[in-house]
Image: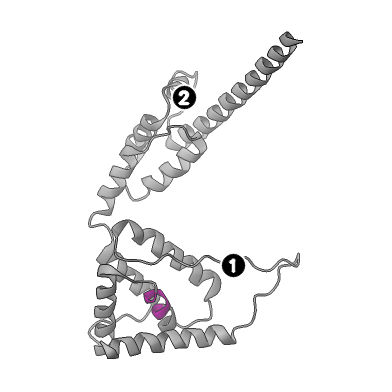
Amino acid sequence: MAQQSEVITTLQQQLLAVQATAPAPAPTPTGVPIVEVALPPKLNGERNQVVGFVNACHLFIQMRMGQVGERSKISWVLSYVQGEVAEVWKNNVLDEITKGVLLVTTVEELFTKIKQEFGEFDEESRKVDELRVLEKGGKTVDKYVQEFRRAARGSGYEGKALVEEFKRGLSGVIRRRLAEAEAPPTTITQWQERAVQLDQNMRLSQTSFGRISTNNGSFSTI
């Protein structure tokens, strides 16, 4: 255990040394400093954390650690793997790396190991479940479309099956109006674009009607 702690401490010190000697971010042409990038959340081994953790690490590495070596990047990522079962896994990984049993030379290889250990056993099934429970609800269609696209990636749904899942999550009014249109949409892109436009038009009409009603009400009280 002492050897494992020494290894990760050494790697973290290397990263700090690189950061200490790195030049300050150059100002943008408008004189505004480059926006800081949020640090990733800690990973304690819960499966619903993995995608967000890896994405956050990717973003930070891309934006702030371009000149940092792979070994220091690995150390940095491992420093955010903390608590519960994740802590045990990290110590095992450090031990295997030290003994040469586990060959991890790039941060991308480490991300692969993290996904294999803590990710979904069946990513496609999880995506399908997420897609099937997704509904527009009280949000705008634009937001629903963005959530749907995220859930659809990796779900295995495509073509007509994907369109039917999208239609299922729409409100009955929007779904019916588009289906009964003179030239109804057929592809998923057409359904999404026209659903967004129809939703915007309906919200605009409701806003305008509300203003007219308010004005009429005000007039009647004078």
| Residue 156 at least partly seen | no
Q: Is residue 158 left or right of residue 89?
A: right
Q: Nearer the viewer, residue 85 or 23?
A: 85
Residue 39 position within the rendered picture, expressed as x and y whole percent measured from the top left: 49, 67
- Give x and y (percent) for residue 161: 32, 35
Q: How many marks?
A: 2
Q: Which residues are magenta?
A: 74-79
* The label number, if any, that marks residue 36 in the structure image: 1
Q: Nearer the viewer, residue 13 or 214?
A: 214
- Give the residue at x 35% y 59%: 49
Residue hosting label 2: 174
Residue 86 located within the stretch drawn in magenta: no
Residue 207, compared with residue 2, is above or below; it is above
Secondary structure of residue under mark 1: loop
For residue 132, above or below residue 107: above
Q: Amino acid at mark 2?
A: Ile
- Image: 98 above or below 74: below
Q: Which amino acid lies under the numbered mark 1 shown in the image of this protein? A: Glu
